[in-house]
Image (spheres, grey):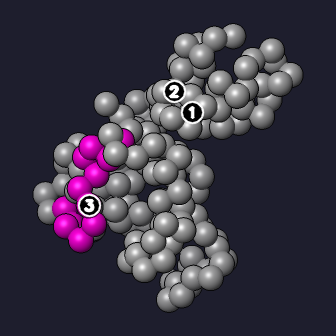
């Protein structure tokens, strides 16, 4: 099966499928590399869910600190960097790490760790012992941030 065929699938499906590649006669290393580098594109629905998380979600609240041309938000934040062209500056893997736990690359960051459960301070009661976003929601944000 070719990478082009895999490219028609969503990132969520690929995340599940990559560990299964060895038994399906698929070059799992090539698929994993394509996913990591953003060669494999997410479906438009994932990008739209990511846009909604970015601009409208009360969980992610990305728009409070960041702007993005496709977010369609009237008053985006300016505390964090403009993320309109972030996919030209960062790989998909780097973006995932920054969303999951930005303190890995910058311990003094004000950005919350969206996929970390331990070592957090001043956490709302509803978020204690759980991540702010699910893995699927992070995939959707990545689909939005890396969409052409």
Residue 105 location (% of width, % of height)? 49, 66
In the displayed structure, would residue 7 be above or below residue 124?
above
Magenta extent: 76-87
Residue in the picture at 36% in, 34% down: 147
Tag 2 near tag 3, CB within 8 Å: no
Is residue 77 highlighted in magenta? yes
Residue 135 location (% of width, % of height)? 60, 52
The residue at which mark 2 appears reads as 40
- The residue furthest right is 23
Is residue 13 highlighted in magenta? no
| Horizontal relation, residue 82 to residue 122: left or right | left
Residue 13 in sight here: no
Q: What element carries label 1?
A: helix
Query: In whole angstroms, how far apart are the C-alphas of marks 2 and 3?
Result: 25 Å
Q: What element carries label 3?
A: loop
Q: What element carries label 2?
A: loop
Tag 1 near tag 3, CB within 8 Å: no
Residue in the picture at 51% in, 26% down: 40
Tag 2 near tag 1, CB within 8 Å: yes
| Horizontal relation, residue 96 to residue 28: left or right | left
């Amino acid at each position: 099966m070719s990478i082009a065929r895999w490219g028609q699938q969503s990132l969520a499906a690929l995340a599940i499928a990559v560990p299964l590649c060895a038994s399906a006669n698929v070059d799992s290393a090539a698929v994993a590399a394509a996913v990591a580098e953003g060669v494999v594109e997410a479906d438009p629905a994932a990008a739209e869910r990511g846009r909604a998380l970015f601009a409208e979600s009360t969980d992610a609240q990305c728009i409070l600190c960041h702007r993005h041309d496709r977010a369609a938000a009237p008053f985006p934040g300016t505390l964090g960097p403009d993320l309109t062209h972030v996919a030209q500056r960062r790989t998909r893997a780097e973006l995932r790490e920054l969303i999951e736990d930005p303190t890995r690359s910058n311990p003094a960051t004000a950005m919350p760790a969206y996929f970390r459960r331990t070592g957090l301070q001043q956490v709302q009661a509803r978020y204690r012992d759980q991540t702010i976003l699910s893995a699927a929601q992070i995939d959707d944000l990545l689909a939005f941030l890396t969409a052409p």
